[in-house]
Image (cartoon, grey):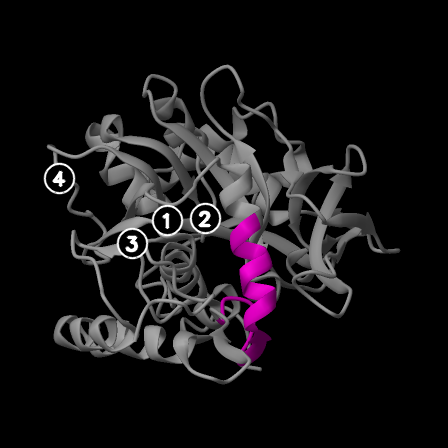
């Protein structure tokens, strides 16, 4: 059987090996891992759809069905934007069971990339004798790979916030790094933002064939008929810069109403990252006077009274924060609850550590 299937490009290579048929590829995939075989088998099957699993970071994880043709449109948009064609050398270091890792593999299969698949650890194995055209990582992987970025030309990062400290470290690397915006329903990213070099931006730029606007909550609404039959209404509060650019401000469902003042946790957290090395988040806790009071939750063992005072003083000196954006209390707890893909589950963390009543 020749590689005539439009889902499988004849030039696709996996860890240096080419394939003469679909069966040849499936046998090789099975010898590597069951997840790899499952993804490829599903993609090359006769069914018109594939399953994608949401992360569960903002609610219960769920599985959705998307059409393969929609996936192909997403693949083409990414490949066009980053100027990737058949024969492009690509590093894959993401878990295959989640949408980012799954779609990265399908891009390679469909576009005919030469893919190196490595273990999806927090410190990916990057061969120093190879140069890659493209790669995708989560922020922790990127942080741990700074010395190896010289072997990668373009890299996208998603799955979590990229701290200002990490952005500063990226300013001196040759690799072009792009932060992505997207979700399972949009088949990974629909917008990207360069975050280093002279092209660094504060705003996300949407990919081709994507329209954006906002609803009455100032949340992003996405119209992308080639990848979704439905208009997607998000809970992401944004500022529209133009009909193709937006600034992400935070999650509507995370907004804290403290004494009538609406506080955006993600905005506050972006400023606190300059003084905190540990993982943390801010949240609203019930308060008789304010309705909700702003608190800071830091991952780690409780600090001494002196250390806590020192942290409070550092926060007080952050002039970029208004007085109502400064946490009223600080809690140290461990561990944070997180999804299997590593995203912090804020509400569940508060509940298991008895900081708020269980839902």
Residues at marks 1 and 2 touching, judged by CB atoms closer than 8 Å: yes
- Give the answer, above or below, for where 80 lies relative to 254: above
Instruction: Mark 3: give few (<14), some (14-19) or many (20+) Cα within 10 Å.
Output: some
Q: Residue at x 23, y 30 (%)?
A: 151
Q: Which mark is residue 127?
A: 4
The span from disc 2 to disc 4 (Cα, nearest Å) is 22 Å
Q: Residue at x 12, y 75 (%)?
A: 31
Residues at marks 4 and 3 touching, judged by CB atoms closer than 8 Å: no
The span from disc 3 to disc 2 (Cα, nearest Å) is 25 Å
Instruction: Name the N-terminal-most of marks 3 and 2.
Output: 2
| Residue 69 among magenta residues | yes
The span from disc 3 to disc 1 (Cα, nearest Å) is 22 Å
Residue 121 in the image: x percent, y percent?
Answer: 21, 55
Instruction: Name the N-terminal-most of marks 1 and 2.
Output: 1
Residue 258 in the image: x percent, y percent?
Answer: 72, 53
Q: Residue at x 58, y 74 (%)?
A: 66
Secondary structure, mark 2, is: loop
Quadrant location, the N terminus? bottom left
The span picked out in magenta is 56-76
Instruction: Name the N-terminal-most of marks 1 and 4.
Output: 4
Disc 3 marks which residue? 300
Single out the mark in the foreground, 1 or 4.
Answer: 4
Single out the mark in the foreground, 3 or 2.
Answer: 2
Q: Which mark is residue 158?
A: 2
Residues at marks 3 and 2 touching, judged by CB atoms closer than 8 Å: no
């Amino acid at each position: 059987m020749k590689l005539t299937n439009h889902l499988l490009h004849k030039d696709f290579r996996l860890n240096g090996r080419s394939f003469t048929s679909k069966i040849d590829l499936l046998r090789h995939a099975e010898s590597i891992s069951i997840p790899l075989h499952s993804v490829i088998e599903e993609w090359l099957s006769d069914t018109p759809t594939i399953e994608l699993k949401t992360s569960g970071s903002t609610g219960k994880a769920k599985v959705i069905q998307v059409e393969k043709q929609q996936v192909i449109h997403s693949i083409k948009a990414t490949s066009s934007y980053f100027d990737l064609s058949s024969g492009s050398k690509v590093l894959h270091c993401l878990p295959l069971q989640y949408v980012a890792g799954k779609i990265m593999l399908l891009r390679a299969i469909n576009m005919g990339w030469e893919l190196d698949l490595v273990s999806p650890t927090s410190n990916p194995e990057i061969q120093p004798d190879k140069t890659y055209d493209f790669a995708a990582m989560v922020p922790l992987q990127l942080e741990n790979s700074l010395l190896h970025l010289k072997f990668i030309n373009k890299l996208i990062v998603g799955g979590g916030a990229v701290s200002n400290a990490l952005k500063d470290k990226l300013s001196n690397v040759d690799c072009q790094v792009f932060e992505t915006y997207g979700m399972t329903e949009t088949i990974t990213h629909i917008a990207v933002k360069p975050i280093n070099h002279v092209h660094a931006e504060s705003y996300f730029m949407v990919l081709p064939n994507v329209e954006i606007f906002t609803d009455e909550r100032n949340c992003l609404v996405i119209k992308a008929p080639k990848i979704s039959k439905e208009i997607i209404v998000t809970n992401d509060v944004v500022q529209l810069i133009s009909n193709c650019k937006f600034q992400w401000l935070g999650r509507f469902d995370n907004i804290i109403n403290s004494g009538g003042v609406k506080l955006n946790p993600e905005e506050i957290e972006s400023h606190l990252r300059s003084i905190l090395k540990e993982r943390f988040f801010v949240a609203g806790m019930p308060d008789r006077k304010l309705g909700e009071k702003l608190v800071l939750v830091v991952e780690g063992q409780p600090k001494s009274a002196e250390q806590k005072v020192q942290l409070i003083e550092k926060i007080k000196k952050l002039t970029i924060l208004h007085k109502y954006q400064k946490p009223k209390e600080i809690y140290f707890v461990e561990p944070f609850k997180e999804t299997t893909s590593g995203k912090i589950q804020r509400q569940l963390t508060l509940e298991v550590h008895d900081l708020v009543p269980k839902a």
